[in-house]
Amino acid sequence: MADKDVIVVGGGISGTTAAVEAAEAGLEAVIVEKNPYLGGRVSQLFRYFPKLCPPYCGLEINFRRIRNNPKVSYHTQAVVESVSGAAGDFKVSIRKNPRYVNEKCTSCGECVKVCPVERDNEYNFGLDKTRAIYLPHELAFPMRYVIDMSVCKGSACAECVKVCKYGAIDLEMQPETVEVSAGNVVYATGWNPYDASKIENLNADTIPNVVTNMVMERMAAPNGPTKGAIVRPSDGKEVKKIAFAQCAGSRDRNNLEYCSAVCCMASLKQATYIREKYPEDAEATIFYIDLRAPGKYEDFLRKLQEDEKVTMRKGKVAKIEEDSATGDVIVTLEDVFGSGKVEERFDMVVLATGMEPAAVSDKPASAVLEKNGFIDAGASADGIHAAGVARRPSDVAESVQGATGAALKCMQTVREVSNV
């Protein structure tokens, strides 16, 4: 008999859904998440499309289900190092990296006040700073601080240890490896924003006012680096004229060959951010190859098309340059329906960069990847499943549906093994 029925690798919306659905059907599930918090990419979003509601509506439901169900446990700051065996009896090695803050933490924040060291805040894509001891974000689950030991001075400083009256900080924590047997492994490893610096003609790495769609999400979020103000990174100027460049690296044999499925809807959603922020004078232009708003999302597209200050122009962005005197961004476009090559000036440009499966860099154990780096569960061993963007480009709704399907497959595996 395996220790656990399901090991879920990844604690985003797909991973938490797979775990709680399996647990509520009676299976024992463990979530293994490499970040110090659950929630994944969804936690970084300002709003979902098409309802434009905050993502924590959905995440908090899953977190509550985890809190209330003893059949779900989780490890943060942890990675799966190896998987061996077969369905019903996988041997899984989990490395738990030290957080340096234990369960006694009350998130009072006194430690931050005395910490002398700053670090780039990766949650906000380096747009602001945290201290070496930090809360991953305001709604983090678990609500507990963590120390970045790559910048922390350790025992040479220890000011945080001195000020913590709960004894929650342990600078001597060590990595720990645990071995677990499991009936199934579900990979819900999610995705990373494609590296826009690889797209040479768009100059994302040299022009400060060219940002990615995920950076735009953090800028618009009230708990983001600008507290919801949509301003230019170069000078803090309010953005009143903005462009969205679709398929930034996607559907491109030199970068991502596939369509990432959500980028058009993401840009349409983000156009509403700027129009709501500055309704009188903000203008948004979306440069697209094809606008993809399948099924129920057509109504959302039509609503944006009716806004006279949102322009949609079919054409491939050929080049992006900077006016060094003003910081403005100059876009050169091959306009399909217009007059050939044209130039237009904007305050800021948002690149709709695609989803690159995290499996490309994480190299999940015992999983077979197809040519683009997504997990091919059909070609993997029995009992190895994939959910969310680990499997294919998906929006949140489709990711939740796929995670529920993965939980069902785990139930089938457990039943088949128990009947042998």
Image (cartoon, rainbow, N blue to C red):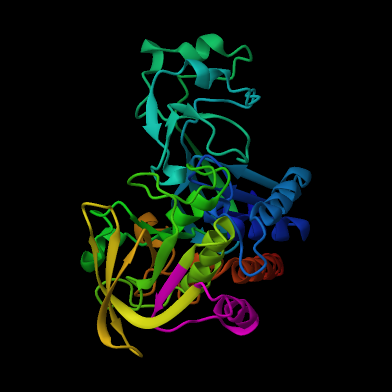
Q: Position of residue 120 (x, y in %)?
A: 38, 36
Q: Position of residue 102 (x, y in %)?
A: 58, 25
- The residue furthest top is 162
At a point 34% along the width and 82% down the height, the residue shown is: 315
At a point 60% along the width and 38% down the height, the residue shown is: 138
Q: Is residue 209 left or right of residue 267?
A: left
Residue range corresponding to the magenta coloring? 284-309
The image quadrant of residue 273 is bottom right
Q: Is residue 25 left or right of residue 85?
A: right
The one of 230 and 295 positioned closer to us in this rendering: 230
At a point 77% along the width and 47% down the height, the residue shown is: 69
- Using the image, determine if residue 63 lies above or below residue 51: above
Can residue 384 be seen?
no
Q: Position of residue 221 (x, y in %)?
A: 55, 49
Q: Is residue 150 left or right of residue 182?
A: left
- Using the image, determine if residue 101 lies above or below residue 11: above
The one of 224 and 357 positioned closer to us in this rendering: 224
Q: Position of residue 89 (x, y in %)?
A: 57, 58
